[in-house]
Each structure stands twice: as structure tokens, then as C-alpha cells.
């Protein structure tokens, strides 16, 4: 997917980077474009096959299928007071508080594989991930602050088409629902226009900021 210009798009990209970081070893350690794609389930296999130039099924597709304002988190300090943000404006350092809107973002993650045992390993590791460190950290390098999005699991089900294996081939498909308790920061209004925001994406492993034990997912410059 292209470089996002929105907070939600940045989280979409972060989920894809996290999925690649967690599961690429089970999918041949191929580049991300050959492993994880951002498309709805109904068209994911065709889109993946067109990119690969052949009919293949060993990949992960994901898509955001629900976005909802979170009233349960609306009165939290992040929403009412904000988080401290450092910035430089006209060569002067300053700090302001930026409020963030609580939004629940639902994702449909589809695991595709021709080997059922490998698919089971993918699902098991997905559950271990949600159990151990279910947090995506977006570190805003310009402002020296982080935004944390908690991840929770939801019902999952088998989408395999084994009953049609003699017509379409045998492969296994498993759908996993996931919810992100995200925060969308409001625009920062200072004396001049901020041209770019450098965002470091991390899988949070227990410490504040991009510490060594956190897993770096990459750096994105948001226009």
C-alpha cells in the first residue's frame, strides 16, 4: 500500500508491517509485497495471484472492515487533556498537549496456506502474540512522543474450501477478527505549518519509547 496521509492509514500500514514481522518466517521469508497484502477477502486471492503471476495461496491478507468511535474511552485523560508533545516552531522549542480521539478499528485477517499444519502454527503464534504483547506503538519522532494502540482478538472461523478441492485445488483458509483500540491525534496548530511527520512503528514489548527490546517495524514519513 502507498504511504498514508492519515492516522488511520498509518495504523493500517502498521498492522501489515506487524503481520509481516511476526509471520514472514513461516511464509518463506519473502519480501512483504509477496507475503502480506491489504485487500478484502473476496478479492485477495486474485490480487495476490496477479502480483505473483501464478495461482498461489501461501500468504496473509488483511483489511479494515469496521471503524467506530469509542464512547467507553471518551472520558480518558488522552481524550480530555491530551498527551505532551514536543515541537520546534520558528527555531523555538516548545511543548503542548494534543488530544486524541478514541476509535475502535476492526480488521479481518485471512491466513492462506496449502499446508494445514503450517496454518495451525500461524494461528497458534497469532494467539501467543495477542496474549504476550498486544500493542502497536507509533512513535512520532518529530514530537518525541508515542501513541499506543492495544489489540484484542475476536471470533475466528475456518474459511477453507476443501469440499471443492477437486475443482479449485486443496488449500486452507482461516479468518481471524482483530480489534485495535486506537487513538487519532488532532492536528497540531503552531505558528507555522508542519510539513512532514516522521513516524517510527514498533511492536511494543514493555518499555516506553523505541527501546532495544521493542521490535522496529520501519520508519514512515507522512506527508
Image: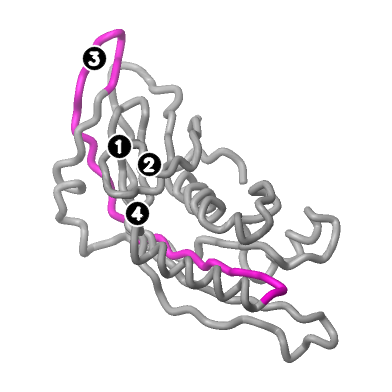
**Residue bearing mark 1:** 209
As drawn, 84 above or below 174: above
Between circles 3 and 1, the one closer to the viewer is 1
As drawn, 120 above or below 49: below
C-alpha span from label 1 to label 2:
9 Å
89 or 85: nearer the eye? 85
Q: Earlier in the sequence, mark 1 or mark 2?
A: 2
**Residue bearing mark 2:** 138
Between circles 1 and 2, the one closer to the viewer is 1
Between circles 2 and 4, the one closer to the viewer is 4
Marks 1 and 2 close (CB-CB < 8 Å):
no
Q: Earlier in the sequence, mark 3 or mark 1?
A: 3
C-alpha span from label 2 to label 4:
10 Å
The location of residue 175, given as percent across then percent down, is 55, 74
Residue plotted at (69% across, 50% down): 30
Q: Which mark is residue 44?
A: none
Which span is picked out in magenta? 87-115
Quadrant for residue 119, please give it. Answer: bottom right
Badge 1 marks a residue whose secondary structure is loop
Between circles 3 and 2, the one closer to the viewer is 2
- Please tell me whether residue 39 belongs to the stretch shown in magenta: no
Amino acid at each position: 500500500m502507498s504511504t498514508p496521509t492519515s492516522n488511520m492509514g498509518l495504523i493500517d500500514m502498521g498492522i501489515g508491517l506487524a503481520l509481516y514481522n511476526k509471520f514472514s518466517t513461516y511464509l518463506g521469508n519473502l519480501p512483504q509485497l509477496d507475503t502480506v497484502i491489504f485487500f478484502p477477502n473476496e478479492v485477495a486471492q486474485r490480487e495476490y495471484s496477479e502480483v505473483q503471476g501464478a495461482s498461489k495461496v501461501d500468504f496473509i491478507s488483511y483489511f479494515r472492515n469496521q471503524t467506530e468511535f469509542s464512547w467507553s474511552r471518551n472520558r480518558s485523560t488522552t481524550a480530555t487533556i491530551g498527551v505532551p508533545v514536543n515541537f520546534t516552531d520558528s527555531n523555538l522549542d516548545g511543548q503542548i498537549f494534543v488530544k486524541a480521539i478514541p476509535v475502535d478499528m476492526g480488521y479481518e485477517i485471512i491466513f492462506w496456506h496449502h499446508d494445514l499444519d503450517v496454518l495451525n502454527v500461524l494461528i497458534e503464534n497469532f494467539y501467543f502474540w495477542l496474549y504476550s504483547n498486544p500493542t502497536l506503538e507509533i512513535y512520532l519522532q518529530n514530537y518525541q512522543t508515542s501513541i499506543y494502540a492495544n489489540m484484542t482478538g475476536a471470533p475466528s472461523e475456518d474459511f477453507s474450501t476443501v469440499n471443492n478441492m477437486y475443482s479449485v485445488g486443496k488449500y486452507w483458509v482461516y479468518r481471524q477478527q482483530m480489534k485495535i483500540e486506537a487513538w487519532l491525534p488532532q492536528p497540531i496548530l503552531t505558528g507555522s505549518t508542519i510539513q512532514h511527520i516522521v513516524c517510527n512503528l514498533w511492536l511494543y514489548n514493555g518499555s516506553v519509547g523505541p527501546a532495544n527490546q521493542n521490535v522496529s517495524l520501519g520508519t514512515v514519513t507522512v506527508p
